[in-house]
Amino acid sequence: MSGGSGTRLWPLSREHFPKQLLPVAGDRSLLQQTVMRVSPVVTPAAAPLIVCNEEHRFLVAEQLLELGSASLNILLEPVGRNTAPALTVAALRLEAQQRDPVMLVMPADHVVQNQDAFNHAVEVAAAVAQAGALVTFGITPTGPETGYGYIRAGRAFTETPQVHRVADFVEKPDRDTAQAYLDSGDYLWNSGMFVMRASIWLNAVARYQAKMLAACREAVAKGRADTDFYRLHAESFKACPSDSIDYAVMEKIAGARAAEDFSLAVVELDAGWSDVGAWSAVWEVGGADADGNVAKGDVITHGSTNNLLVAEHRLVAGVGLDNMIVIETADAVMVAPKDRAQDVKHIVAHLRDHNRRERLFHRRVYRPWGHYEGMDRGERFQVKRITVKPGASLSMQMHHHRAEHWIVVSGTARVTRGGDSFLLSENQSTYIPIGEKHRLENPGTLPLELIEVQSGSYLGEDDIVRFDDKYGRD
């Protein structure tokens, strides 16, 4: 499940570039780490099914291709509807493709540091799920954490010591309650990961969320394949209730004491797990130096301890800092005490209320053909640096309100302008008048880099009329 709104790790994560697509704990993104994590515990034919928002589809596909994934299996949501509908449409697709498969269900933004312990827990959970139970993973707590929900483990479910019946799901507690949970030894952190047969999940949704199941069935049935993606039917999925797996089904099963139709088990997992839900969690898994500092990028410290310092574009220097978070990107800098990391969401809410683009995009914006980066902007002009991948092309398009000048910095460009088509090489340029149909392509084997100068009365990205697009965009 690769959804997310990009709020908790702002400014590195944005709405159109959420944390699962970022390498916040290693050289690979969290999504890539998740795919790599499951490869030792699934059959070779079981390519992962990724459920994501259609806004992220090309980034997700590209990150899977970087791993050498030969088969892309990506299910696109037109809108976010939380995890229960995401799992339901995935189960419907998988049940149609296979004969009632056992599903390992995971968010794409977790960190697991002990692969062997994870493998063992999944094998145990799969055996319990194959027998018909709905299985969740409970994380062995390492402290009185108030940012997680908890699971109260009941009596033994099987002879395996780490498997218990779920006695109760508990909301995020206050500090004193969390300490009491820890002292009792009966409580585990709720991981949000599950193992279950597709048919068992669908039967449970039918029992407790009939409207959700009906909307998901219709969204899948009326959906359509689109190259490497499967698009859910937009209107059907928008009519689906929004709810989490826990609220929609799991808590209802746990609360139905007399019901015998469903079995709910929890497998204890002690594998260095984190959901990287705040910048303080990134510090915890980041590998601190002797002074307790986690530094990424061009960072210098003096007399500073226990900080997280991230420099994306500029030198960041910390003097006398303690337990601080400093995150620098091209268009924003965020500074906060580590114990206030959760409050970043209030900054994102302010950006949303004031319609600021910094909550949506980085200065560098990714597209299926490459990316562009804003360099300068005035009242009637803006300057972009554009990179087009080898063999890629922008759509055939036109603009009602702006003209464009293109200057090639490196590589070769094929330009279609009106009825003409011609090549441009390094240091050559061309002009696209307002209202002229045009296309930019990279016919070479190296990236094409150019500077684009836009001028006109309106410079928004929505001033694009597409006539033809190889990526299926409207």
Image: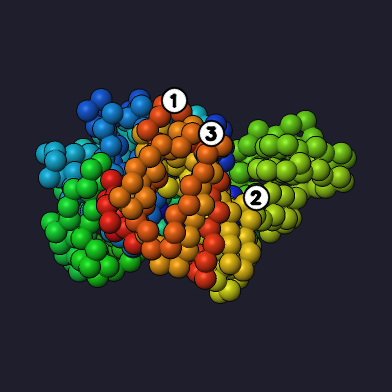
> Mark 3 or mark 2: which comes first in sequence?
2
Q: Quadrant of the C terminus?
A: bottom left
- Name the secondary structure under disc 3: loop
Which mark is nearer the camera, 3 or 2? 3
- Give the residue type at disc 3: Glu
- x%, y% of residue 229? 25, 46
- Residue drawn where x is 56% and y is 37% of the image: 427
Mark 3 is surrounded, within 10 Å at the Cα level, by few (under 14), some (14 to 19) or many (20 or more) other residues, namely some
Mark 2 is surrounded, within 10 Å at the Cα level, by few (under 14), some (14 to 19) or many (20 or more) other residues, namely some
- Residue drawn where x is 52% and y is 39% of the image: 428
Q: Quadrant of residue 397?
A: bottom left
On the question of residue 146 being in view, the answer is no
Query: Relative to residue 29, is residue 160 drawn left or right?
Result: left
Numbered mark located on residue 116 in the image: 1
**Viewer-proximal residue among 212 and 63:** 63
**Viewer-proximal residue among 270 and 451:** 451
Work out whether 246 lies above or below 105. Answer: below
Q: List the residue tagged with mark 3.
A: 426
